[in-house]
């Protein structure tokens, strides 16, 4: 293994060779806090509160496994002399660990970034020997945070607005509105309407012939004199589509 011999305490791996501790966040261990967690009046849905605004903050995910793993990650990170961020080399992976570092108040510690694109031992060793400053990817992390916060504000405010208006008209259910939802649902509805309104038509095939006027020079293997050959007449079919079922061929 690229990291040397292993021991496996709960929620972590230990490398006896280097004295390093390895832990993980298999998924988001934190979530953005909801508006009612900052202002209890938001628990009651009202047009008077829209649009809502609330501070950006994180809170642990309620799932028991994730909350336990978050405690392990923070405990090990606080004991470490240096933190190495080894999550996926993409924007979401960058943000997933950065939000834990910010939540635990660990940004003052030395933090390095390792970018592993290949999990073979040789490539892992190569990546570990090419650590970078994690601050270099700060912009990538903030871009994910900005998109997530915008999605939350958009979804929460519009869901409440549409649902309240729907209830004024006698509706009972909640109308969920999200950033990705409308275009996906729009595509589904569009395809459904296209299928239900399309009409079938007859296809009439008109035989016709064409003759090519080009000539091709070729040489006989026995005679070097040139011969001229005209290609034979070819027959093609032309089709007219979407005609009324009973219409005669043109």
Image (cartoon, rainbow, N blue to C red):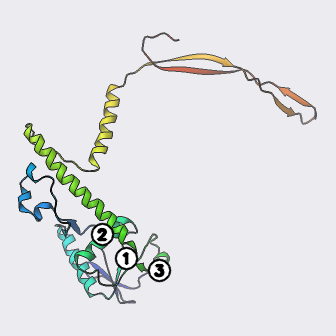
Along the line of sight, the residue nearer the viewer: 222 or 145: 145
From the viewer's perspective, is residue 95 above or below residue 211? below
Q: Position of residue 223 (x, y in %)?
A: 94, 33
Quadrant position of the N terminus in the picture: bottom left
Q: Which residue is drawn at 35% across and 30% down?
A: 194
Q: Residue at x 34, y 86 (%)?
A: 82
Distance in Å between CA atoms under marks 2 and 3: 21 Å
**Quadrant hosting residue 228:** top right
Please report whichever mark, 3 or 1, sits nearer to the chain's N-terminal start: 3
Q: Name the residue under label 3.
A: 130
Q: Name the residue under label 1.
A: 135
Q: Is residue 74 left or right of residue 88?
A: left
**Mark 3 closeness class: few <14, some 14–19, many ≥20 residues within 10 Å:** few
From the viewer's perspective, is residue 88 above or below residue 198? below
Q: Residue at x 76, y 25 (%)?
A: 231
Q: Which circle, 1 or 2, is nearer the viewer? A: 1
Q: Which circle, 3 or 1, is nearer the viewer? A: 1
**Mark 1 closeness class: few <14, some 14–19, many ≥20 residues within 10 Å:** some
Distance in Å between CA atoms under marks 3 and 1: 15 Å
Q: Where is residue 36 in the image (x, y as percent from the top left)?
A: 10, 61
Distance in Å between CA atoms under marks 1 and 2: 15 Å
Q: Where is residue 192 in the image (x, y as percent from the top left)?
A: 31, 33
**Quadrant hosting residue 201:** top left
Q: What element carries label 1?
A: helix
Q: Position of residue 188 (x, y in %)?
A: 31, 39
Please report whichever mark, 1 or 2, sits nearer to the chain's N-terminal start: 2
Please report whichever mark, 2 or 3, sits nearer to the chain's N-terminal start: 2
Along the line of sight, the residue nearer the viewer: 109 or 218: 109
**Mark 2 closeness class: few <14, some 14–19, many ≥20 residues within 10 Å:** many
Q: What element carries label 2?
A: helix
Circles 2 and 3: CB distance less than 8 Å?
A: no
Q: Name the residue under label 2.
A: 96
């Amino acid at each position: 293994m690229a990291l040397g011999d292993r021991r496996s305490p709960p929620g972590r791996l230990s490398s006896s060779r280097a004295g390093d501790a390895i832990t993980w966040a298999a998924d988001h261990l934190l979530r953005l806090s909801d508006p009612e967690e900052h202002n209890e009046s938001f628990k009651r849905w009202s047009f008077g509160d829209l649009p809502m605004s609330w501070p950006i903050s994180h809170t642990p995910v309620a799932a028991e496994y994730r909350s336990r793993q978050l405690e392990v990650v923070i405990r090990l990170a606080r004991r470490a002399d240096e933190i190495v961020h080894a999550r996926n080399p993409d924007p979401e992976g960058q943000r997933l660990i950065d939000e834990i570092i910010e939540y635990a108040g660990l940004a003052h510690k030395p933090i390095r970034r390792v970018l592993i694109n290949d999990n073979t031992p040789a490539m892992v060793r190569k990546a570990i020997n090419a650590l970078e400053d994690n601050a270099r990817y700060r912009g990538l992390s903030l871009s994910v945070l900005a998109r997530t916060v915008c999605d939350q504000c958009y979804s929460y405010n519009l869901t409440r607005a549409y649902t309240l208006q729907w209830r004024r008209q006698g509706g009972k259910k909640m109308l969920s509105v999200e950033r990705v939802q409308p275009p996906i649902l729009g595509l589904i509805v569009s395809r459904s309407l296209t299928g239900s309104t399309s009409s079938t038509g007859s296809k009439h095939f008109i035989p016709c012939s064409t003759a090519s006027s080009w000539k091709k020079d070729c040489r006989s293997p026995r005679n070097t004199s040139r011969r001229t050959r005209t290609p034979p007449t070819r027959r093609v079919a032309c089709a007219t589509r979407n005609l009324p079922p009973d219409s005669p061929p043109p």
